[in-house]
Amino acid sequence: MKSRRFIQNKRPGRCLGPLSVLCAASAVYGAETNAPPQAAETNAPSTAAETLAAALTPEQMFEGGTNTYHNWVEVSAGGFITSGNKAEFRQQQQKSGNVFGGIEDLHYQASGTNGTSVSVDGRALFDEDDYRLRLEVSKEKLGYLRFTYSEFQTWYNGDGGYFSPSQAYYGLPGNGLGLDRGEISFEAGLRLDKLPSLTFKYTHATREGDKGSTIWGPVHPANDAQVRGISPSVLDIDEHRDIFELDATHHIKATELGVGVRYETGKLEDTRNMDFWRGEPIEQKVKDRQGTTYDLFNVHAFTETWLKKNLLLTSGFAYTDLNNDISGSRIYGSDFDVGGVQNGFGYYGLDGDSRLHEYVLDLNLLVKPSPSWSIVPSVRVQKEDTDAFSQGMETLGAAAPTPFSAESDAEVLDVRERLDITYNGFTNWVLYARGELTEGQGNLEELGGTVPINGIGVPGVNRETEDNRFFQKYSAGARWYPARTVTIDVGGYYKNNDYDYDHERDNTPNDSASANRYPAYMVMHNFETYDGNVRLTLRPVRKVTMVTRYEYQWNTVHARPDSISGLAEVESSKMTSQIFAQDISWTPWSRLYLQAGFNYVVSETETPASDYTRAILEAENNYWTVNFSSGLVLDDKTDLNIGYFYYQADNYQDNSEFGLPLGASGTEHGVTATLVRRLSKNLRLTCKYGYYQYDDGTYGGNRDYDAHVLYSSLQYRF
């Protein structure tokens, strides 16, 4: 389930939203419809204040009068009161859940008489680790200098899984995991008349902190003899990148052309900390280090040329050279970073490198044979060459370390052709169609890998595979305006992705007696999709708009193994999805608007395995959401906004006794109320209250939470 943010950052100059326009429209509408001509003439403004008010536009009436304020500073403070699983709250809402405050938004700009301008934008909220600064100095017909800095934190729930038979929940201590992201950049642009435009940018980006891992460690839950992967694992991330970019563009007659170069270097030192057999006498700590340093060089160019008034040709080319050096280890011990005589395959001293060369060419032609037709044929060619090598020492318990090595080479070539056609020659109709074909081929050679120790483990790989790919996608649609109050959109597409593999060399037997058939086991994969959708927009009466949408999608996956296995082609899975959506907006009064929406999704995945074992069940992913929002202009200085959101899923299948439980079960509520009060033409106050509740069924209620938020901001415009 995706995270949803209920507290949105305000955009500069739009703190009131549509309410100020509605309020202003109310004054204008009342003046035009309720005041007889005689009254308007008899009661003409008699004072200077009334004369000024009569001359104001609706926007000026509630946005500071005739003065236009280009600058503002907004300070805010707030806090959360939470109960339950705070880590889940932080992940869902992407908020710290603590008291916070500071500068919500800052904007200042000033212009000089010589064409020079200065602007400053900023944001600084303590305890949210949310900071942003942007400084820019520009001069007309010369260029600009720009400096930006940003830092923010993303939150994750690193808890593990839940075993319902014994009601065991594998959580992490604390209130969740945090990952800090930061970026500093310097940019300079040169903009001289009749000369190429030049832009240089340097960026330093970082990621530091922890996040949950999708790989859980094995345990034997109480009253269960099977191994279950439900013990939490944590990713410890330490990454930084430095990026240098230089771009130039120039216009020559009917052609716009550009060329650029990019150099990027970075270092990634990440670890995955896993807890195996948690709470058991054989508990082990596993630290998997994954180190990468890389250098990337890219050069690119583009052109746009109007060959005729109705004929546009565009082209693009890019070359990329990526060089990686890798290192790492996988150490088992009684604690992280503590080696010892432990079970499980590990390694140390991993050393290797890889190299990628990529070439991309794009060509597009826009043809308009008449005002009603638009035809765009295009072609894209992409070629990749990759080689890699690695080596290290493999470990298993008390056995002597054993050296291992691996190498691979790959070549990929894809050619995509596409044709887009649009026609609007019929009255009240717009028709469109698209056809897309991709033909590709590749070669992959792999040699080596991990090796058996004392007869335990699988041998390395020795294989060469030729593959061919053929992708098709055809889509079409129409928009029809049968009446001024009705719009109908109908569309759909068909997609077929076909992969064929020819294993010219393979050291893993694929017959029925083999216990090691992968990786060269499948010889065909086919993915087929049918999709259709319809959208109806109605405006049955004035001030009411209704939008109804329905979409149906059907997907199948076919697979065929090596013929020596004795198995035939099979439909390995079938997925069907339906989406029902209804939205309505109503403005019953010029000072009031109401909006509501409903979405219902029905999704099911079927696999033949469910016919033979209870360990794998057919999966459902059905859910529905309801949202509501309204805005009311209480008076000329006060606005009230109310919002509500509801989500429910009830697809959890407690299959813990036999295999992996699938599906999700949970409900979520969110309600907010915001009051905006204009204290003066320069000063406005915002107060907000929100309540959020999440009830979790998938994890036995262990991720439930309730949260209240109180928030206030004061904006001064000048």
Image (cartoon, rainbow, N blue to C red):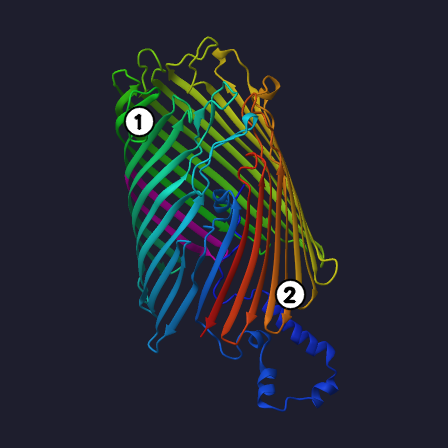
The overriding secondary structure of the stretch rendered in magenta is: strand
Q: Is residue 420 left or right of residue 635?
A: left
**318 versus 401 height, above or below:** below
Front one among 409 and 174: 174
Residue 577 is drawn in which quadrant?
Answer: top right
Give the labeled residue for mark 2: 632
Within 10 Å of disc 2 (Cα), the crowding (few <14, some 14-19, many 20+) is many
Quadrant assignment, res 342: top left
Query: Which structural element holds mark 1?
Result: strand
Give the image location of residue 538, x and y in percent.
71, 55
- Residue 599's x, y, as percent? 64, 45
Q: Which residue is depicted at the point 30% across and 30% down?
A: 387
Q: Which quarter of the rendering shows the C terminus? A: bottom left
Magenta stretch in the rendered image: 294-322
Q: Which mark is residue 166?
A: none
Q: Residues within 10 Å of mark 1 (few under 14, many from 20)?
A: many
What whole-number distance in Å separates the C-alpha atoms at marks 2 and 1?
Answer: 62 Å
Q: Position of residue 621 (x, y in %)?
A: 60, 35
Task: Give the tally of numbered discs.
Answer: 2
Q: Secondary structure at mark 2?
A: strand
Q: Is residue 199 visible?
A: no
Instruction: Name the residue carrying label 1.
Output: 331
Q: Quadrant of residue 405?
A: top left
Residue flagged by tag 1: what amino acid is it? Ile
Image quadrant occupied by the N terminus: top right
Frontmost residue, 135 versus 344: 344
Is residue 385 in view from this perspective? yes
Residue 335 colored in magenta in the image:
no
